[in-house]
Amino acid sequence: MEWWHNSQIIFRSHWTLSHVRVLSLPNSQDIPAAESVEELKLVAISALENSSTSEELEVWRVDFIGRKGKLTSLLRGLGSLAVDDRRVVGAAANRLRGELEGLFEKRIAVVNSSSAPLGSIDVTLPGRKPASGGLHPSTQMIREITQAFNEMGFQTVEGPEVELERYNFDMLNIPQNHPARDMFDTFWVDSEKDDLLLRTHTSPVQARVMEANDPPIRVVVPGKCYRYEATDATHEWQFNQIEGLAVDEGITFADLKGTLYEFARRIFGPGQKVRFRCDFFPFVEPGVDMSIEWKGNWLEIMGAGMVHPKVLENAGYDSDKYTGFAFGMGPERISMLKNEITDIRHFFSNDLRFLSQF
């Protein structure tokens, strides 16, 4: 039996690879005494399997297969061995390096395949439902109101928001000296003819429809309107309005009342009580306001009346042959009643705390 001795390395020449023992290596990290190549393999694989983050894998790489790692230190001591032993031990060590490097690449691919650090996401939890939008409360009420009239035979039509003075005032029997024409009540648009404005109501569409069509007519007209006035809890300079018009032979005030009774039942419920009182509007005669009984009080919700003969004549109709009725309401005001909203300004504030409730 023959021994080779180096001041820091001792090998027994006729042992098999599994019997090679490394006591200490020059300029290397500490390696446990009597640790064989096979034992080093087992220790390295066990440590690799217990590494679950990129940081831990980097520490493992440096510790086992890095330039100053345990396997590298083992290979540096081969020069003190006999040629035959050096060949056997070196081949085994190189095979171990290739195996460990392959296992390292597979392990780091598994760890990096997760978009977040391992353990930060519980995949068993139910998914989060994405936020979804909804219709604006004004839009919801406009659709509900127009649908009620559509089911009674009315057709929904729309008109321009930038309107001509002729349709907004002249054809609706609103004379030149009417306060609505004053610059403090109407938004006038700069133009060469000085006759453009932002419509103050949806009634101009009545005139346009009658001018372009022969009776019978039954239309409901939703749309935005604009008035130059101070804003408060019940008034806005921009608001929606829904106009209704019916023209035919033999239409009476009873037809108006019956239509609006049915509308109130469809919107507020079958037992809803309504009340009509005389009122004045320049484009109807006679004119009324309609109120509903709401929590013990009578609340006005719209104006209405029989179409004024001059309005019919301005559209080219024979006022002795044709009659009609018209009505107008604010969908925001009706929504305020049904949803107990106290300030009309909420509708146009774009506050998601308000809008998300609908």
Image (cartoon, helix red, strand yellow):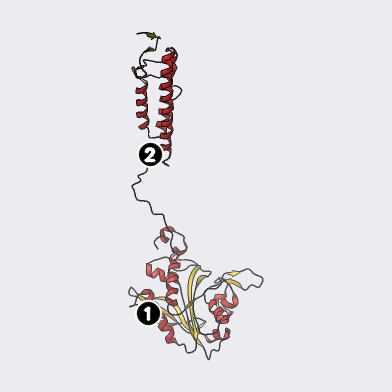
The CA span between labels 1 and 2 is 67 Å
User: Label 1 amino acid?
Assistant: Val
User: Label 2 amino acid?
Assistant: Leu
Q: Is residue 205 in sight in this rendering? A: yes
The secondary structure type at the circle numbered 2 is loop
Contact? badges 1 and 2 (CB < 8 Å): no
Q: Is disc 2 surrounded by few (<14), some (14 to 19) or many (20+) residues within 10 Å?
A: few
Q: Nearer the viewer, mark 1 or mark 2?
A: 2
How many labels, in total?
2
Image quarter hosting the C terminus: bottom left
**Residue 194 appears in which quarter of the rendering?**
bottom right
Report x, y in % for residue 29: 40, 19
**Residue 179 appears in which quarter of the rendering?**
bottom right
The secondary structure type at the circle numbered 1 is strand
Q: Is disc 1 surrounded by few (<14), some (14 to 19) or many (20+) residues within 10 Å?
A: some
Report x, y in % for residue 83: 44, 13
Image quarter hosting the N terminus: top left
* In this view, 343 is above or below 33: below
* In this view, 276 is above or below 71: below
* In this view, 268 is above or below 305: above
Mark toward the start of the polypeptide (1 vs 2): 2
Report x, y in % for residue 12: 36, 12
Q: Is residue 50 in sight in this rendering? A: no
Q: Which residue is mark 2?
A: 118
Nearer the observer, 145 or 333: 145
Q: Which residue is mark 1?
A: 274
Q: Residue furthest bottom?
A: 320
Q: Is residue 216 left or right of residue 53?
A: right
